[in-house]
Amino acid sequence: TVVVEDDRTGLSVETLKRAFQDNLFYIQGKFANIATQNDYYMALAYTVRDRLLRRWLTTAETHTHQGVRTVAYLSAEFLMGPHLGNNLISLGIYDEAKQAITELGLDFDALLQQEEEPGLGNGGLGRLAACYLDSMASLDIPSIGYGIRYEFGIFDQDIRDGWQIESTDKWLRYGNPWEISRPEWAVEVKLGGHTERYTDENGRNRTRWIPHEVVMGIPYDTPILGYKTNTATTLRLWSAAAAESFDFAAFNSGDYFRAVQQKTVSETLTKVLYPNDESAQGKKLRLAQQIFFVSCSLQDMMLILIRQGIPLEQFHEKFAVQLNDTHPAIAVAELMRLLMDEHGIEWDTAWRITQKTLSYTNHTLLPEALERWGMGLFSTLLPRHLEIIYEINSQFLDDIRRKFPNDDARLSRMSLIDEAGERYVRMAHLACVGSHAINGVAALHSELLKQDVLRDFYELYPEKFSNKTNGVTPRRFMVLSNPRLTNLITSKIGDGWIKHLDDLRKLEAFVEDADFRQQWRDIKLAIKQDLATYIKQVNGIDVDPTSLFDIQAKRIHEYKRQHLDVLHIITLYNRIKANPDVHITPRTFIFGGKAAPGYFMAKLIIKLINSVGDVVNNDPDVRDRLKVVFLKDYNVKFAQRVYPAADLSEQISLAGKEASGTGNMKFSMNGSLTIGTLDGANVEIRDEVGAENFFLFGLTTPEVYELKAKGYNPYHYYESNPALKAVIDRIASGGFSNGDTNLFNPLVSTLLYKDDYLLLADYQSYIDCQDRVSQTYLDQEYWTRLSILNSARMGKFSSDRSIREYCEDIWYVKPVAVELKE
Ligand code: 26Q
């Protein structure tokens, strides 16, 4: 008998080839002889999407019919990375697809590289949301991600003359095969205007909001398939559109142009992602983006219940809503408003529902990153929300008075309204009051929240607080990004580790196997060779793949201290200049990361890295022992190639500043060693891998507080440490700026006279530690043992573990199996 698989679902190589050619013709509308690389990519993407659809629709149907509680993950950012490779892995047809494409005479890897990633996030927070969607789907947790479909994501970065140049990220230019728009499920969002009281048909006093403006939210859905399971959840992103029905007045009066103009105003709402991480300036458009996606999402959840005839009094039984930082914190007031004003539920009931529904994750300890909105702006855009916030605040302050009588200082510290000078709404306070659970993202961070940033809230509601250490998905950051290492690991311990990352411990049994160590080393070298080829192509720099690849890849920020890394490079350079025959372990210093466009100091750090590179890379005295490379336009797609290539991962933020970090986990899983401070999740990584397998340096958080309290004087370190002085002097005297002593002056004087992030205090400890790294690298057998142990002991940092903890302690949700019907 001849069995012919369905072209839309069949998984054999033959069927994949047929389906691909079919899609090239019928979707892209091309004969093969004129098809572009992008046409081929699209044809493959649609071939894969077809194979997700049955699971996707069946998952939605199963969750609806079972009436289970669903996690709604609200995030202003989802940094998903390319979908194609990941979906092939989840479907379990990566090898089949590769064979099919190769047999058609095409370059499979080139097709994967063709995908333009949706860069709808800045960095760690957005990528965490993406890892959590992957883990929730992989663990069969009913879940949906809600966010914003920015037309322009994080800017593209180019480097010209050593400086960062930004350009717009036109990710939708060639279409997006992964999303399906659902205009039939559009909702309306109100903005501006004023409120009115009225008495309803039951004689109750109600409030009505007469907006200045109404914007439509159109949902775009992307399937999120779990790894080797039938569960495929949804990422639902909202795009703003003009409410056609709204400005009838303008149409009717014949003011066609005003009506069309209104349309462009509405549509600017979701035009662009704000590119500043870790700093919150109060921009009106940003607040409008927040209320827009939060209102769309909450209305959407309500419609899902209403369509099923479920009363909204059960809202909290059907949805657990997680707030990814304070960006969606307006949900506290918006959920209250929708329940009361739009659905007639009484305050007390609405408040119980709200608190039981919402929970809040904090991602920062930096005071400048705490969101607050000026009262003028807030009341103009959200007059009704402000009334609700005042009422929440008045009840909240009564609560505090009962528990802490006669403590006015506490009242003003905790109030939802900052009244010290100009008045502001404090979004973190709103999130804390409106949620039943508050968490930090690493053990140290959660402790510091309780002791410091949210101390008053901890004293009032200790039971709300917990820690949920971040994790990352091993599907994308090992299986997809590092196939060679994945195959080696699987050949030794089977593939169970991909879903149960703790199983990596089984690798410890092979640490003393010289053959295994050789294979481990060979793989690392091959990956480094690939990156060296890329560096040659893009940067035109020759790097030695056997040199120590020392990588710092993350957003550029003073607290992350990329410039401390630079001080080390210059220290080595000075040693060479003093004695060209000095022994130096050859190193390639690799940096990647974007600076917020308005963050001058971060941009100057990029310029410094490139300037130091120009000098060091071209000085014959260096004899190619040191190379410095800045990799432009660091994004998820590129990150996947970078993590596996590192020997050493730089995690050198000042203790007490990095909430968690997640790049630290991705590097270590792929067999990189870490040089790091006791900050964020580094503390837990070191606990897991063992102190003897981690290069630790620097002040601890209490030491930082102590030093600052007694009066920190950076200049003293400069004066009393000749090596440090020589480094700073070389920068200041124009050694990396052709004699120009002005260029880096802002950086130099900040270090000498302010140094908020204590680079000079940590300098010697860092240099000593780096010297131990260089010494250790000379013994390749020993280094390889440490590398293997790092991977083997990273099980805790799977985002699957994080998600299990959220499910258990905060969301109270359980897995739901999805059965595919024939
Ligand atoms: C806020 C207001 C206005 C404009 C922009 C913003 C904004 C945007 C993005 C503020 C902060 C962010 C991003 C923060 C972020 O990525 N934080 C990181 O979160 C990771 C996941 O928990 C942690 O691992 C990192 O330590 C933390 O820095």
Image (spheres, rainbow, N blue to C red):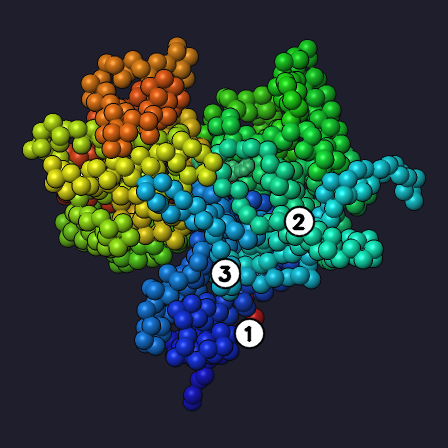
Please give the label number shown on residue 212: none
Sequence-first disc among 1 and 2 = 2
Asked if disc 1 and disc 2 are in contact, CB closer than 8 Å, the reply is: no
Identify the disc placed on residue 822: 1
At label 2, the amino acid type is Val
Q: Amino acid at mark 3?
A: Arg
Above-or-below relation of 228 to 211: below
The residues bearing labels 3 and 1 have C-alpha atoms spaced at a distance of: 38 Å
Q: Residue at the left extreme?
A: 581
Percent position (x, y) of residue 350? 74, 38
Q: On the picture, is 486 further left or further right than 282?
A: left
Give the crowd class for mark 1: few <14, some 14-19, many >=20 residues within 10 Å. Answer: few
Q: Which residue is mark 2?
A: 265
Name which quarter of the figure residue 738 lies in: top left
Residue 110, position in %: x, y?
34, 64
Which residue is located at x 37 percent, y 66 percent?
111
Circles 3 and 1, Cβ within 8 Å, touching? The answer is: no
Distance, label 1 to label 2, CA atoms, is 48 Å
Closer to us: mark 3 or mark 1? Answer: 3
Q: Which residue is mark 3?
A: 173
- Can you name the residue that lies furthest to the bottom here? 1
